[in-house]
Image (spheres, rainbow, N blue to C red):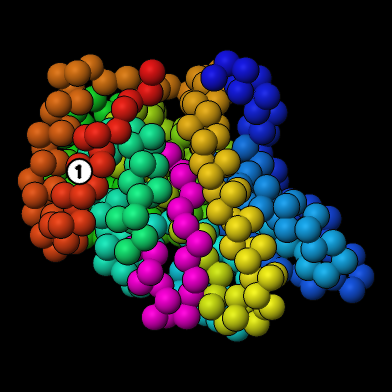
Amino acid sequence: MRMLGAVFASLLIAVPFSGVAQERCDSGERELKFSLVTAVKGHPKGEAALAFATAINRKFQGKYCVVVYGDSELFKDDYTLFEAMKRGEVTFAAPSVDVLNKFTPKSTLFSLPFLFDSPLHALAFTDSDVAQSILADFADDGFHAFGFWSGGMRQMSATVPIRSVRDAEGLTFRVSSDSPVTAAVYEAMGVKTIEMPFAEVYDALASGKVQGQENTWSNIDTRGFYKVQAAVTETNHNYLGYVTLTTTAFLDSLPEAERKVFVDTMRLVSHERNGFAFELNQLSRQAIIEDGGVIISLSKEELAGFRAAFKPVFDRFKGQIGAELVDQAIAINATTKPFE
């Protein structure tokens, strides 16, 4: 891990909020746009998208050119993105699982509190045959879901330090979707929630429109959320993942050999980059500390208080999401070895 940290330390330098992460395409090449809402460099999703673009551009030099657009430069992760993909304006995207419940209610599984013990446990699930049932649901809406990209575990931050469930009572938190599961989690804390696009979160925190948020270390770092919060509490309360998408129309338009290259390249990149997501998040966590950010590490007793408070939420929504699916995720989590 230390060697990986040295290799990827430079990745934590975030690109400006309005930049394309690579040069434009050469004359005669067909540009294939990859739209992200996150930072590109230093972020697990952004780095994975760059790796995919680099591989495809090398294999199809002179014909196709994948360009990665970050920081919501093209679209937010909402219906406008999906409509743009159907119109052919965007070819690839990797939206958060939180905003995909319109395609499959099964994606709400990832909002369940404390379902997975770590990113490794979550990866064991997303790599399983069980998770393929979630991806298959996108076909009915005209999308091809390649697979999952790892974002990491979510932490909480607010304008007050959070060490217990009721410490943030009365505050308003930004959430990424109107998931009833997420709303119920924060109801247990006495917190109100507002659904808000990722690109608007920093300004909302800075202005006081919202007083708290939940996110991965990479997002908290690259967007500077910690700079306008009293502290970040290391809760690891649920998992943020992304689904890599294109349209079935795009894939169907390709010759079979080319289609296979795109699918196989995404599979290989996903396998390689998901392994680096944990490292990038740890580097972001350290970067926050070095920049003077405050991180609260909960004691076993404090963490147990959060788990106990959120357990009724877990039990309430398990059946709505699909008891069999949730039980399969629980079983995979239980049989996955933790980090050494």
Tell me: 241 left or right of 55: left
Give the position of the N terminus as an image quadrant: top right
The crowd level at tag 1 (other Cα within 10 Å; few <14, some 14-19, many 20+) is some
Q: Nearer the viewer, residue 55 or 281?
A: 55
Tell me: 171 left or right of 138: left
Question: Looking at the rendering, which quadrant does residue 35 occupy?
Answer: bottom right
Residue 28 vs 149, above or below: the answer is below
User: Element at badge 1?
Assistant: helix
Residue at the far right: name it.
Answer: 27
Seen at 55% across and 26% down, the residue is 283
Q: Is residue 116 magenta?
A: no
Seen at 70% across and 28% down, the residue is 10
Tell me: 112 left or right of 10: left
Residue 23 rendering spot, x and y as whole percentages: 83, 55
Residue 314 rendering spot, x and y as whole percentages: 14, 48
Q: Nearer the viewer, residue 57 or 21?
A: 57
Residue 176 vs 330, above or below: the answer is below
Q: Amino acid at mark 1?
A: Ile
What span is colored magenta in the figure?
134-152
Residue 75 rendering spot, x and y as whole percentages: 58, 67
Residue 62 vs 198, above or below: the answer is below
Seen at 20% across and 43% down, the residue is 330
Tell me: 324 left or right of 271: left
Question: Looking at the rendering, which quadrant does residue 129 occupy?
Answer: bottom left
Seen at 66% across and 33% down, the residue is 11
Q: Which residue is mark 1?
A: 330
Residue 122 rendering spot, x and y as whole percentages: 35, 42
Q: Is residue 146 magenta?
A: yes
Give the position of the C terminus as an image quadrant: top left
Q: Is residue 227 visible?
A: no
